[in-house]
Amino acid sequence: MDYTTRMLSSPPKDPKSAVLIDADRENRSISWLEYVSTVKRIAVGLRDAGLAEGDGVGLLSVNEIYYYVLGDGVIAAGGIFAPLPTTSLDQLGLYIEAAQVSWLFVSVEFLEDILLAAPNWKLDKTRILVFDPPGLEPYSGRLPKFSNLLSAEESRFKNPYEGKDPKKLICVRSFGSGTTGSIKAIEISHAAQLARLDAALFAPDPRDTAWLQNIGLSHVSSLNMCNRACAGGLPMALTSVVDAPSLLDRMKAFSISQIQLSPALMESITETVKSGLRPADALQTLSTVLVGGTFSRKVSVEEFSALLPSHTRLRTGYGSTEAGIVTMTPIDAPWELGYTGVLTPKVELKIVDIETGKELSLDTPGEIVIRSPEMMSGFCNNPTATKEAFLPDVDGRGPWLKTGDKGFVDPANGQLVLHARYHELIKIGTETVLPVDVDEVLMTHPSIKKAAITSVVARDDELDLEIIAYIIVKDGASITAQELVDYAASKLPKHCVPIGGVIFTNDLPRSFAGKVQRRNLIHCPVLPGSTKRLSISSGVEYKAE
C-alpha cells in the first residue's frame, strides 16, 4: 500500500472529530473529514499549477496545524515533501539545495527575506507560494498562495501511486538533528513511512485524550506524530510555545495525556513546578511521557518522576531520522536509567568494530548497525554519502544502516546501552573523552545550570586537543573559570578537565530535539569572566586516572 492510500482511508471512530488541534488559538481544529478533503484539493490544485511527479516541495513555517496537511497534499499530488527548519538564510539555502526543492511554500513572517534570497538559490519566484492556512489572517498580496489551492475540485483527485512499489517511491525528504557535519536530505519511502506509522510505541490507555506537540514541525518526530493523528490515532494538539510555564498551561487546558520532552525541557518543567510558578496538577492527566532526543541526567529524571502521578509511564527510546525508531522502553516495564529500551518489532541490530566493520558480540561496545523497514532509502542526490551509510547486503535481505553511534546490548535485560556518537568522542592524547559524562559532572556544581564541552587545539601541541567548557550559571549564583577548573579536577580524570577554557554564556545551541549542537558552541555569546588557557591550581587534588 502507498502512503496516500493509507492516510486517506484510516478514519478515527468519529470521522467528524478533531484530529489536529491548535493549542495556541481558541476553537481552531481540523477533523479527519476536513483533512481528507483538504489533502485532495491541495493535490488537485498543485497539479493544476504545474507540479510534476517527483518535484521537491519545501515548507518554511512555524508550528501550524495545516503544516502536514499541506505535506500530505504534496505527496498526494505525486510530489516529495521537504519540511524545512527555521534557520538562517545561509543555512536554509543549503537545506533547499540538498532536498532539491523546486517549489517553496513560505509563511508570511519569512516571506520578505525569502524573496530577497531566492535568486541565490536558483528558485523560480513563480514557484514560491505564501502559506496562508484557513483560520489565520489572509494574505492579500499578489503572490500565489496556499489558500487558492483549496478552491480546486476534490472530485478530480486521482491517486498517482496505484500499481507502484511503495518501497521505491519517496514521499519525504527530511533532515537530521544538526549534530553532524554537512547537510544531507534523508529520503524516506512510502513503505518506510508507513512502517514508522505502525510502530507500536505506546500502550493504549482509556484515559488518553490528546498528544501535545511543541517540537518544531520540521523534526521527524513531529512528522510521525502528525501522521498518527491523521491516520486515526490519538489527536494531536499543536503549540509553538517553548517555555515550561506556557507548556504546562496548555497541558492543563487540553487535558493532555501524552507528550514528548527533551531532557532540557523536562528539567525546566521540574524547576517551574518546584519553584511554585505553576502547580503540578497540569501533569495529572498524563498517561505517557516520552523523554528523548539526547542523554538524560539521573538526578533530573528522578526529580521529574517524583512530580508525576503513579499511573504515568515515563519512557525513553533511541532512533534517528535515518533509522526510524530502534528501541523503546518496554511498555509493561519502568524506564531503567542508562538504558534506551528493547528493540522495536521488525528491527534487527548488530554491533560492529568501527574501524574494521567486523561483527562483534552484542555485549561488546561498538558501532550500532541496524536493519529495519523504517530505515531511509538514502541521501538525496548523494550516492557517495548513501554508500558510506550502509553495509553491503550479504544475505539478500537488504543492507544494514550504520548509525554512527557507539553502544552495546546488556545480556541481563536485553536493553540497549547508548554511549555516544562516534564523531562526538574527543581524543586527548591516548585517552577518549565522552562529552556527556563530563557535562554531567560539571553540572553537579551548585552554581552551574547547564554545561557542554567540546575541544580546542592544545596550547603546546597542535596535533593534540584540550577540553573547553561552555557554562550557563544559575540565577543569583557565581563561579569563576578557575574555580570551575579546580572543581572539575577534583571530580574527573585530568584529561577531562576543561583547561582549554571556560566560556560563560547565556544559551547553548540545540536542535529541535534538544540535542546540544557541539559544533556550534563556538558561536555562543561570551559573557564576562570567560577565560581560555587555564591550569589546575597547585595543591588541588585531582581525581586519579
Image (spheres, rainbow, N blue to C red):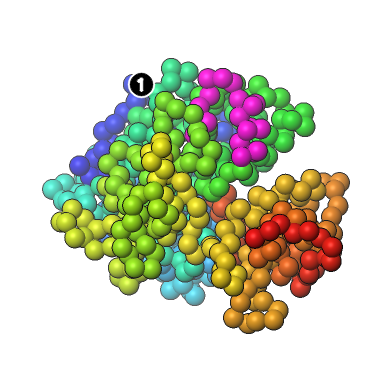
**In the image, farthest residue toward the front:** 544
Q: How would you rate the neighbour count of disc 1 (Cα within 10 Å): few for under 14, some for 14-19, many for 20 or more?
A: few
Q: Residue at x 57, y 66 (%)?
A: 431
Helix, strand or loop at label 1? It is loop
In the image, residue 63 lies at what x, y percent? 53, 45
Q: Residue at x 60, y 58 (%)?
A: 435
In the image, residue 314 lies at what x, y percent? 52, 31
Q: Is residue 505 visible?
A: no
Q: Residue at x 37, y 62 (%)?
A: 353
Rendered position, 72 above or below 277? below
Instruction: Please report the bounds of the magenta region as a residue range.
Output: 298-315
Q: Is residue 24 visible?
A: yes
Rendered position, 24 above or below 442? above
Amino acid type assigned to the residue bearing label 1 in the image? Asp
Q: Is residue 274 left or right of residue 380?
A: right
Q: Is residue 186 left or right of residue 264?
A: left
Magenta stretch containing residue 464, yes or no? no
**In the image, farthest residue toward the top:** 206
Count every numbered label the image shows and give the total.
1
Q: Quadrant of the C terminus?
A: bottom right
Rendered position, 189 above or below 286? below
Magenta stretch containing residue 312, yes or no? yes
Q: Residue at x 34, y 21 (%)?
A: 13
For the residue pair 445 and 21, the one nearer the viewer reads as 445
Q: Quadrant of the N terminus?
A: top left
For the residue pair 156 and 501, the one nearer the viewer reads as 501
Q: Which residue in the structure is indicated by mark 1? A: 14
